[in-house]
Image: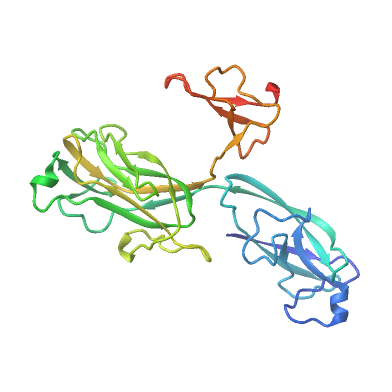
């Protein structure tokens, strides 16, 4: 949540009555209660849990505001889980009388613009290296684990080398990008095996001979609610948002690889969640014209930020594969 406060002056002749949150006397209720709400009278995508409704933030923190006096209206904003980018919301005071009378907006309008960015959570290595791994401190102070990978070592050594495990709780379920970091160097293995606890229990192989010392993307994975993470997980982000269930996220690096070389492990990073992009039926007037290999009927994917544009996945050779942008000009 991102809080902000408006200080507004009552320049009129009537008091702004606050919501006393109890049974107000009948005469007081007839005059109406003044709330800060959305200027368009519609539900806001930024509504937080402490709003009295999706379109009304609340009344003055200072109680009734007499003519010539000022009062504070606090606004908590909560980013939607299904959107990334900029959201603009305009607020205005609204006098809300008892039904069946309609709310009456009045006064100046206040506009807030919020840019919704994905969460960026880094999970460090555990404090104790698993059996079979060595610890090294890099010149920049970062700790890494490393070991020489010999194919089949799990079957030939006792005890068998154990995997490196990163665990944390994510604040929200959804699709997250997973990155790993390991130091660059010669003699790395070409087949480091990473496992992720998404619904498919996905295994991904990375070539550690390239891209060392920076973040390497393992992939985008879906993490669902449920599970718990021990206090020893090593990441300080270990609690869910208020009212939200736990979202357990686990990444492991196997202690052996299919090809010989040095395995290295550093921090893991989770970035997200990203809005799910659903395939939609082609709207009337749109087509994937000019692409003979496009399937029929043409599936298209609508951009969440550009209403008139659609993307048509095209099945062609790997070298030529691309998304063809279909816009209003193609009608």
Relative image position of residue 19 (x, y in whole percent): 76, 74
Q: Residue drawn at (64%, 24%), measured in percent from left and top?
A: 287
Q: Is residue 5 left or right of residue 299?
A: right
Task: Work out which quarter of the rendered image holds the C terminus and state it.
Answer: top right
Is 329 or 29 nearer to us in this picture? 329
Q: In which quarter of the image is residue 248?
A: bottom left
Q: Residue drawn at (55%, 17%), measured in percent from left and top?
A: 292
Q: In this view, does 214 lie above or below 129?
A: above
Residue 302 visible (yes or no): no
Please tell me how many numbered marks the rendered image carries: 0
Residue 49 visible (yes or no): yes
Colour theme = rainbow
Q: Is residue 163 left or right of residue 48?
A: left
Q: In this view, does 320 lie above or below 18?
A: above
Q: In which quarter of the image is residue 312?
A: top right
Task: Work out which quarter of the rendered image holds the N terminus and state it.
Answer: bottom right
Q: Residue drawn at (32%, 59%), measured in percent from left and top?
A: 234
Is 67 or 165 nearer to us in this picture? 165
Which residue is the extreme one toward the right? 13
Q: Residue drawn at (29%, 49%), measured in percent from left and top?
A: 252
Q: In this view, does 277 lie above or below 61?
A: above
Q: In which quarter of the image is residue 16?
A: bottom right
Relative image position of residue 303 (x, y in whole percent): 60, 36
Q: In this view, does 256 lie to the left or right of 120?
A: left
Relative image position of residue 98 (x, y in whole percent): 84, 71
């Amino acid at each position: 949540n991102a809080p902000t406060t408006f200080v507004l002056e009552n320049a009129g002749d009537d008091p702004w009555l606050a919501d006393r949150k109890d049974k107000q006397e009948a005469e007081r209720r007839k005059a109406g209660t003044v709330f800060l709400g959305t200027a368009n009278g519609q539900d806001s995508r930024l509504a937080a849990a402490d709003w009295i409704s999706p379109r009304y933030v609340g009344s003055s923190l200072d109680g009734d505001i007499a003519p010539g006096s000022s009062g504070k209206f606090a606004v908590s904003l909560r980013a939607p889980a299904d959107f990334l980018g900029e959201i603009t919301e305009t607020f205005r005071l609204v006098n809300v009388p008892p039904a069946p009378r309609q709310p009456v907006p009045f006064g100046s309008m206040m506009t807030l613009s919020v840019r919704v960015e994905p969460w960026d959570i880094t999970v460090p290595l555990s404090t104790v290296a698993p059996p079979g791994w060595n610890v090294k401190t890099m010149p920049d102070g970062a700790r890494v684990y490393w070991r020489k990978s010999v194919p089949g070592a799990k079957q030939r050594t006792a005890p068998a080398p154990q995997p490196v495990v990163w665990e944390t709780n994510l604040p929200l379920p959804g699709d997250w990008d997973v990155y790993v970091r390991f130091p660059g160097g010669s003699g790395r293995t070409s087949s480091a095996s990473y496992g992720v606890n998404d619904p498919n229990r996905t295994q991904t192989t990375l070539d550690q001979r390239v891209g060392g010392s920076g973040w390497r993307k393992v992939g985008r994975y879906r993490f669902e609610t449920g599970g718990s993470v021990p206090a020893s997980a090593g990441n300080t982000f270990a609690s869910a948002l208020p009212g939200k269930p736990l979202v357990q996220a686990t990444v492991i690096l196997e202690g052996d690889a299919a090809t010989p070389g040095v395995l290295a492990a550093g921090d893991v990073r989770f970035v997200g969640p990203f809005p799910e992009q659903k395939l939609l039926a082609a709207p009337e007037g749109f087509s994937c014209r000019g692409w003979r290999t496009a399937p029929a009927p043409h599936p298209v994917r609508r951009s969440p930020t550009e209403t008139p544009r659609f993307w048509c996945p095209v099945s062609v050779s790997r070298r030529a594969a691309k998304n063809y942008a279909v816009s209003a000009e193609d009608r």
